Amino acid sequence: MTETTPHPATTDALDAPGTGHRHTTRCWWDHERPGWVCPPAAPPPAPDAPLVDVRDMVVVHTALLREFRLAPAAVLRVAPDDRRRARVVERHLGLLCDLLHHHHAGEDALLWPLLRERVPARALTLLAEAEAQHAGLDEALGRVGATRRRWVDRPDAGHRDELAGTLRELHRQLAEHLDTEERTLLPLAAAHLTEPEWRAVGEHGAGAVPKSALPLVFGMFAYEGDPDVLASMLASAPALPRAVVPRIAPRVYARHAARVHGTPRP
């Protein structure tokens, strides 16, 4: 039996008749049989199970929040019509926006559905709030993308200032969302997810980063990240990257920060 693409119907809105089972994104439609294939869900942690360590997400949040806070100033430092500098900063913004998009895509696919099944009913409003914030951030990312393209095509003062404004608004929304997530949702994830389930969220984000960008991204995380947490984030990596990346990543980020922010220690 070969796994194929999901059935065109929205899986999380369908019930399997007579079983009480509600299809999720884990389920897929086998066109050869045909029929639904529904892998068993991982059992939730036992009530007395130790909390899952979720500090790696705080490391990611800290880096994203710092870089988006610094982004408007990086744009405004580019002189009108300096196309070379505009391209340098625009590539940096593209990396940040991709990181944020994939980070949230992993939560949408792997974190919220599990929490929705397991948290107390009174906590569901917190999940709904986080999902609404994700939708707002997706719209803000779209606006930043449009203004980025206009600015890099014609890097005059007007397009530069417009892009800086959209980045400030994105940072404002991101700060609000990450504060909500860290205060209310990460504690729920620590209590209601298993270690493999939590690890899958991080692996989803890491898998979306181009290999050539991994030292830079890890350097962003390492700039303010807890060394013990950073080591745990590399624990499943092959031996060579696990040994080399922590050594070179800070230097890679310092050089990158000097080009983008004007200082290796922004």
Image (cartoon, rainbow, N blue to C red):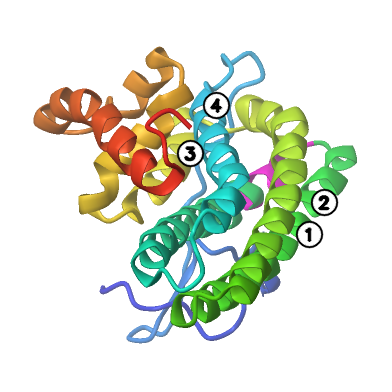
Can you see residue 45?
yes
Circle 3 — which element?
helix
- Residue at 19% over, 29% down: 248
Q: Using the rendered view, name the quadrant where residue 37 is placed.
A: bottom left
Numbered circle sitting on residue 132: 1
Per the model, the C-alpha gap separating discs 4 and 1 is 22 Å
Q: Nearer the viewer, residue 166 or 129?
A: 166
Single out the mark in the foreground, 3 or 2. 2
Residue 190: x and y in percent read 61, 26
Amino acid at the residue labelled 2: Glu
In the rendered structure, which segment of residues is drawn in magenta? 113-119
Circle 1 — which element?
helix
Circle 2 — which element?
helix
Residue tagged 3: 197
- Mark 2 near mark 1, Cβ–Cβ under 8 Å? yes
Can you see residue 11?
no
Per the model, the C-alpha gap separating discs 3 and 2 is 22 Å
Amino acid at the residue labelled 3: Glu
Residue 182: x and y in percent read 69, 31
State whether residue 159 is above or below residue 206.
below
Circle 1 Cα neighbour tier, 10 Å, few/some/many (<14 / 14–19 / ≥20): few
- Mark 1 near mark 3, Cβ–Cβ under 8 Å? no
Residue tagged 2: 129
